[in-house]
Image: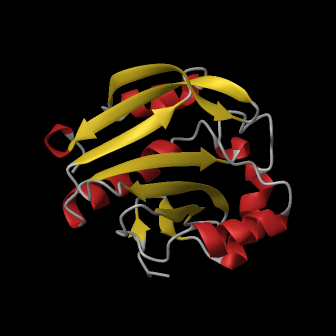
Amino acid sequence: MESIRLISSRLLLRPIHLADASGVFQYRSNHLVNRYQGWIPETIADVNDFIVNRVSPVINEPGTWFQFVIIIQDTGELVGDIGVHVSAENNFQVELGITLNEVFQGNGYATEALREIISYLFNQLGKRRIIASIDPRNLRSVSLFERLGFRREAHFRESLFINGEWVDDLVYAMLKDEWNFG
């Protein structure tokens, strides 16, 4: 696993490790909070499997997901995670996904963490385009990505089958020259 460490004013972002499984399970297993997510683990073993078998050890590998955990620097608490998916067809495009423990929502952690990741992707990895796929019922995520300056590019009706139902998909995007936060 790469040893990337991104540090913002309050947060540390680093690659996910097996030692994080219990903390990740604590907030990811909440079916109500994560109802718009495609993956809700039933057991800690599911999280271990995810970390070992579905997360790439390298951030810039086309066609894979790389997972960061979000940690509050002052307390060491794991409060969420961010997935980075590098397109298999276009190495200059990535997709982001974020999950934040409901206990820590509303404190600006998601905005702060995403700003750090986005700056890293554009400025260090030379990415050109970043997208986010959001269920339109997830108003907090829609607001988050709009606040960061992403623009809505598409609304696909009932295009994804997630958690036993057909759901709409909003696609938000940003180009490198549209990024205003460094």
Along the line of sight, the residue nearer the viewer: 101 or 41: 41
Q: Quadrant of residue 2 in the image?
A: bottom left
| Residue 27 appears in the rendering | yes
Q: Position of residue 58 (x, y in %)?
A: 42, 75
Q: Position of residue 89 (x, y in %)?
A: 30, 54
Residue 171 as seen in the image, left or right of residue 14: left
| Residue 109 appears in the rendering | no
Q: Quadrant of residue 158 in the image?
A: top right
Q: Position of residue 114 (x, y in %)?
A: 42, 49
Establish if 18 lies above or below 91.
Answer: below
Q: Position of residue 127 (x, y in %)?
A: 23, 56
Establish if 75 lies above or below 141.
Answer: below
Residue 20 as seen in the image, left or right of residue 172: right
Residue pushed farthest right?
A: 43
The structure residue drawn at horizontal position 60% and vertical position 47%, both measured from the top left corner, is 99
Establish if 73 lies above or below 96.
Answer: below
Residue 162 as seen in the image, left or right of residue 164: left
The structure residue drawn at horizontal position 64% and vertical position 66%, both measured from the top left corner, is 75
Q: Could you tell me how many numbered marks the image carries?
A: 0
Residue 135 as seen in the image, left or right of residue 85: right
The structure residue drawn at horizontal position 44% and vertical position 57%, both measured from the top left corner, is 84
Along the line of sight, the residue nearer the viewer: 147 or 61: 61
Q: Quadrant of residue 59 in the image?
A: bottom left
Q: What colour scheme has been applied to the protein in the rendered image?
A: secondary structure
